[in-house]
Amino acid sequence: MTSSETLRRWQTALPFWLSFLLVPLVILAAVHGGWAIFLPPLVTWYLFAALDGIFGLNLENADPQTPDDDLRWYTALTMAWVPIQFLLLIAMLAYVPGADHLSGLEQLGVFFGVGVVSGTVGINYSHELMHQKSRIERWLADLLLAMVLYSHFRSEHLLVHHRHVGTPRDPVTARYNEGFHRFYPRVLRQCWQSAFHAERTQLARRNLPWTNRRNPFFRYLALQATMLLLAMLLGGITGVLLFLVQAGVAIWQLELVNYVEHYGLTRKYLGHGKFEHVMPRHSWNAAHKASNWLLINLQRHSDHHYRPDRRFPLLQTHTETDAPQLPYGYPVMTFAAMCPPLWRRIMNPRVRRWRQIYYPEITDWNAYNKALKPEQRPDPTPA
């Protein structure tokens, strides 16, 4: 590979590295306090929403057959983030609880900002890493999830969500007219249960009990306990409380995104316990350029579910012919999701139009959904 070709590929990947600029904002918030504590959420949410308006949509698609050797800068991005987030979290736990210039509210504000970063970037990067075949990348995903006490997300996402998306068996698929404030406590409970059930079923297929050491929940527990112990050693009780704040903020952001990604979209039931195959039309697509830089193309979610083996730079954006489109990127849509009347006003007409386009033969959706109730039982067969 020539030096000019290497430079070109680095320049192409460079916008996706913008997330690293959030790290000095968190440090500035901790050192300065006051107005600076608002910088991480303001930049992450509102600046990128404004940049979406400036840069518009990106409708270009990379060649999906691009070899992994040509994606080195993209792979390095997600892997490099893990030690940086870990060091940032450790530094904040060591510094903020004893910082005399920060009031209690300012300390909470700093760790709210840490949670914005560990949720928007950290969990998102863990999502990319957990889908890879490399054992190292999957371990890095586990480390990122342990930093926000949500390790079971790996099991739930890979074994439950991807198989059952768009069906009543998937806790994360938000139902039509289900507000986020009802959705959130439901998924916090059901996702842990469905993840554990899926792993227990996997072990049962090998004639192993759930207590076998191969159950990843033991690894999840150990990693999370280690993070809590580090928080205690570095910051005492205050450190643990602040760590829990950032974890809660990160989890809230993850589930906000989950809510947006599949709201109201369902796969057609074919009978005998079977649903149609997952297609691009079963996820909301967003081609907004700036927020896709920040979220490493997560908003090309229609293609991710259609081809979950693709690395993020190769995800394709689909037109409205093949996939439903969000009117705005995730920074705006997650804000709208926090206001159920506004959300329903924006999204319910789009869901109804989606139903008319793809499933015109279903004329009574209330009756159709009631008929699916027996299918809400978890499928005993693991993915």
Image (tube, rainbow, N blue to C red):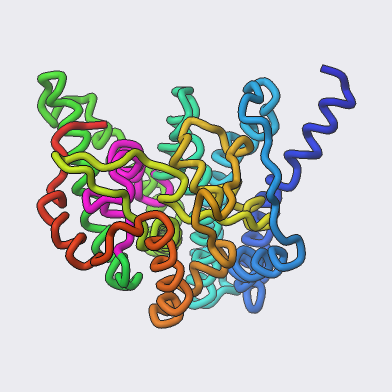
Residue closer to the observer: 178 or 36: 178
Magenta stretch bounds: 146-175
Q: Residue at x 48, y 30 (%)?
A: 309
Q: Quadrant of residue 257?
A: bottom left
Q: Residue furthest right?
A: 4
The reply to whether the magenta stretch includes residue 149 is yes
Q: Residue furthest front?
A: 361
Q: Is residue 242 visible?
A: no
Instruction: Report whether 283 appears left or right of 22.
Output: left
Residue 190, how many percent across, how many down?
21, 54
Q: Residue at x 41, y 66 (%)?
A: 351
Q: Residue at x 35, y 62 (%)?
A: 264
**Residue 74 drawn above or below residue 108:** above
Residue 179, how many percent across, how many down?
33, 73
Q: Residue at x 47, y 35 (%)?
A: 307
Residue 287, how many percent across, how many down?
62, 54
Residue closer to the observer: 232 or 71: 71
Quarter in which the N terminus is drawn: top right
The reply to whether the magenta stretch includes residue 129 is no
**Residue 361 drawn above or below residue 138:** below
Q: Is residue 276 visible?
A: yes
**Residue 158 drawn above or below residue 49:** above
Q: Quadrant of residue 246?
A: bottom left
Tell me how many marks there are: 0
**Residue 380 drawn above or below residue 289:** above
Instruction: Report whether 20 appears left or right of 349.
Output: right
Residue closer to the observer: 153 or 338: 338
Quarter in which the C terminus is drawn: top left
Residue 66, how many percent across, how many down?
66, 25
